[in-house]
Image (tube, rainbow, N blue to C red):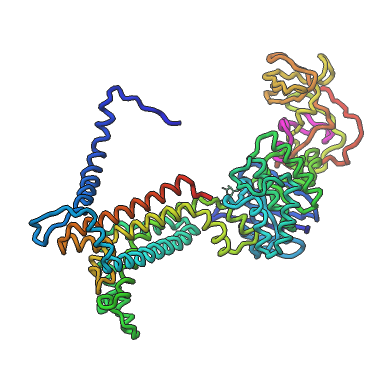
Amino acid sequence: MRKKVIFPQLGLPYLLLLPQLAITVVFFFLPAGQAIWFSFLRQDAFGIRTEFVWFENFVELFQDPLYLDSMWVTLVFSFWVTLLSMSVALGLAVLADRHIRGATAYKTLLIWPYAIAPAVAAVLWIFIFHPQIGLLGKFLNGIGIKWDYKLNGTQALITVIVASAWKQVSYNFLFFLAGLQSIPRSVLEAAAIDGASPARRFWTVVFPLLSPTTFFLLVINLTYAFFDTFGVIDALTKGGPAKATTTLIYRAYIDGRVNLDLGSSSAQSVVLMLAVIALTAVQFRFIERKVHY
Amino acid sequence: MATLELRGIRKSFGAVQVLHGIDLQVAEGEFIVIVGASGCGKSTLLRIVAGLETATEGSVLIGGADVTRLEPKDRDIAMVFQNYALYPHMSVFDNMAYGLRIRGLPRAEIEGRVRRTAEMLGLGDLLRRKPRELSGGQRQRVAMGRAIVREPKLFLFDEPLSNLDAKLRVQMRAEIKRLQRRLGVTSLYVTHDQVEAMTLGDRLVVMNEGRAEQVATPMEVWREPANTYVAGFIGAPAMNFLHGRLCEEGHAVDLRAGPAIALAAPPASATEAEVTVGIRPEHVRVVGNGAAGAIPLKVDLVEPLGAESLIHGILPSGEGLTVRASDCSPLAGTTLPIVLPAEHLHLFGGDGRRLRLAHARGAAAPVRVGA
Ligand SMILES: Nc1ncnc2c1ncn2[C@@H]1O[C@H](COP(=O)(O)OP(=O)(O)O)[C@@H](O)[C@H]1O
Ligand SMILES: [Mg+2]
């Protein structure tokens, strides 16, 4: 039942909405509008003259092979970050679900990465991946595998993927754990009695029943990989070597803040905005249609 | 189809012991009902048989083979859960076919078996539906079908009807009974509902706090309850219990509430004079005013049930007594003369155990001894 609250004056509800609206306007609509406006403009290198160029920034963008490269990097990066963070989280959640008594301590430990600033997280990963001082880096070089993420593009990509995925594991873990715990125990017991091995139970019962959670997390993680991984990349590889880890969001930053090409950077932001709108639309559509089995 | 044997099953959860050594032998095709109050360990016992729980001590034998250490999947049993535990994302057909597919049966055979079972249960038109598109009764049937289609050695039921409304429950109860007869599969059925237990079971296991108080046929349990717990648990409304004292060397019992009543024979095992006398409400006789040996019952509350009435009253001793009478519905506050027929009395010793009379229940007419 939904109750309709009647306010005596018409003004009060709007007054109560105001802070929320103000925050949305100041921190979202204004910058977004500005980005859209700038994406139609072009400034000369010294910022003296500005002209309105319609879609030229976008056309140029999609003709730039480097931009298409970074699009590809973004796809590879997002795919692996999402896959890695979700599968590790699911594995941990399954383990925790079995021994739910110890799960409180376990959950607390697992949630920490989520609370750590990207830059701090990156420093932690330097201590692991750095070829000279990192635990894993030293070890790999020790056993004869040449490891240096500052020189090798693939290794750089692996490094930022792992560091980015790691930060997201705890978030996914909590959702997966909640999802697992909402599966009635008796359903799994029925499957056990029906003769299903643990692995079969997982793939034929647990995983399908988790699909709403999985889908929700898929969208969240893609969004994260697209937009929220700037800090990790900046702290670890700065998009290098040779742009091997330059994702769309990182390039937008470089072009805007470093190269001061506000027009192109804004156009890139608009492209990213469209991507997030598309992802959200997909999400809403599916949630409305209830992917629940 | 197989026999089932439980040997000294004990179970503790941490420091709490919930099963205190259960022994049971079930013949092939027998329908055993485990009945007891909520929390007495029925489900735990059933789950140990299923292999979902490990017994702390004791062993489980199915068809003579020790399965105590086997996983549920290796025991060839089927279980119907209280909440049905259907696979929510699978159709009715897939729910029933799941176990068969795992066993790698050929497609055609799976199809045939599922269809036959579905027809038998009246689910033929629902095979494509998902569980959430079914009513409670239909879900219940699917859960049954999933068990039946596997043709297991043993059926386990854990309160399968308790989520249904009263009418459907009665209907499904009869259906389960018919199905079990027809299929002849050895079954273990857990319930807290004594009517369900009485109507379904070939034999009952009456459980109380992790112990099997009595294992016997429903009529035996009703006629000769092994102790006051069983006597009070089986039968509705519950048996009345009164204070009494054996006298005349055990040939009569002197009620605190009224006259001494002569017994057909003295109890064989009585060690003390103090006894508990039990009598079922339906066995108390309402007599005319001034009848010999009548006890006045002060009527407190009358509950009409239609054909009969339940009369709750107070005896002169202050003890309460419930009477189930057909053709009698006195007003509250009036006094009703009643008689407790000797042949319907149950005697229990100080430890609550039934006192058996020295001879088999004789045909001797009850002799009343004046108060
Ligand atoms: N997994 C468990 N852990 C701890 N205690 C349990 C567990 N399962 C059951 N119990 C306890 O064992 C007792 C018997 O439970 P159960 O067999 O479910 O009773 P019933 O089915 O007769 O209602 C209860 O007191 C219950 O709290
Ligand atoms: Mg139970």
Q: Is residue B259 left or right of A212 when viewed as pictured? A: right
Q: Residue at x 79, y 46 (%)?
A: B202
Q: Is residue B273 above or below residue A42?
A: above
Magenta includes A83?
A: no
Q: Is residue B232 above or below residue B52?
A: above
State which quadrant residue A111 falls in: bottom left
Viewer-closest of B15 and A213: A213
- Could you tell me residue B333's position as x and y percent? 68, 14
- Could you tell me residue B154's position as x and y percent? 73, 56
Look at the image and give the residue range highlighted in magenta: B227-254
Q: Is residue B288 left or right of A151 when viewed as pictured? A: right
Magenta includes B232?
A: yes
* Numbered marks: total: 0
- Could you tell me residue A50's position as x and y percent? 12, 54
Viewer-closest of B198 and A92: A92
Q: Is residue B238 above or below residue B289?
A: below
Q: Is residue A97 left or right of A163 when viewed as pictured? A: right
Q: Residue at x 54, y 54 (%)?
A: B15
Q: Residue furthest bottom?
A: A144
State which quadrant residue A43 falls in: bottom left
Q: Residue at x 65, y 56 (%)?
A: B48
- Could you tell me residue A75's position as x and y percent? 35, 64
State which quadrant residue A221 falls in: bottom left
Viewer-closest of A166 and B225: A166
Can see residue B225? no
Viewer-closest of B20 and B128: B128
Can see residue A195? yes
